[in-house]
Image: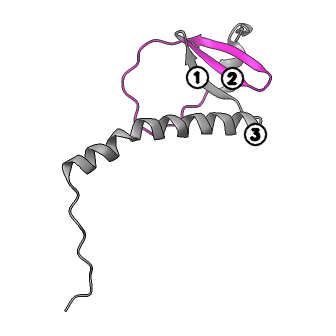
Amino acid sequence: MSRKKLKAQITEAQIVAQESSIPSIAAKAFSDAYKVALSKGESVLVVRAGQLVSVSNTGEWVIRPVETYGTIKAGTRLKIKKSLRESLPAPAQIQA
């Protein structure tokens, strides 16, 4: 005899209810990660008004304009090479 407990079947309505909360959970997770990174003195890359912007505790700098690019897999980390960043013209400050 098996001692395994049978799992109750989840209904479609329960699945839909759980899935509907995913966007708000994800938004909060991104917001929290953004705040933690800034509180630790790190910089964060964001897109605002079609511009890639580096945000840190000391200010915000436009890195370059961005265009629509194909799809990127979730969890992909992008890095900016220092040599590329140094060759760009002086960054413009953004007024928040």
Where residue 26 sits in the image (x, y, percent)?
A: 47, 38
- Report whether 41 appears left or right of 75: right
Please rate how many residues cluster around mark 1, counting C-alpha atoms within 10 Å: few if below 14, some from 14 to 19, many from 20: some
Where residue 71 sits in the image (x, y, percent)?
A: 37, 27
Badge 2 amino acid? Val
Where residue 84 sits in the image (x, y, percent)?
A: 65, 19
Dots 2 and 1: beta carbons under 8 Å? yes
Q: For residue 23, what is the image quadrant?
A: top left
Could you say which is closer to the camera, residue 36 or residue 20?
A: 20
* Above-or-below relation of 1 to 20: below
Label 1 or label 3, whichever comes before in sequence order: 3
Q: Is residue 69 magenta?
A: yes
Rounded to the nearest angstrom, the CA distance separating label 2 from label 1 is 7 Å
Residue 64 visible at all: yes
- Residue located 76% across and 19% down the image: 59
- Residue located 72% across and 10% down the image: 91
Q: For residue 7, what is the image quadrant?
A: bottom left
Residue 75 visible at all: no
Which residue in the protein does label 1 denote? 46
What are the residue bounds of the magenta stretch?
51-80
Which residue in the protein does label 3 denote? 40
- Report whether 50 appears left or right of 40: left
Which residue in the protein does label 2 denote? 55
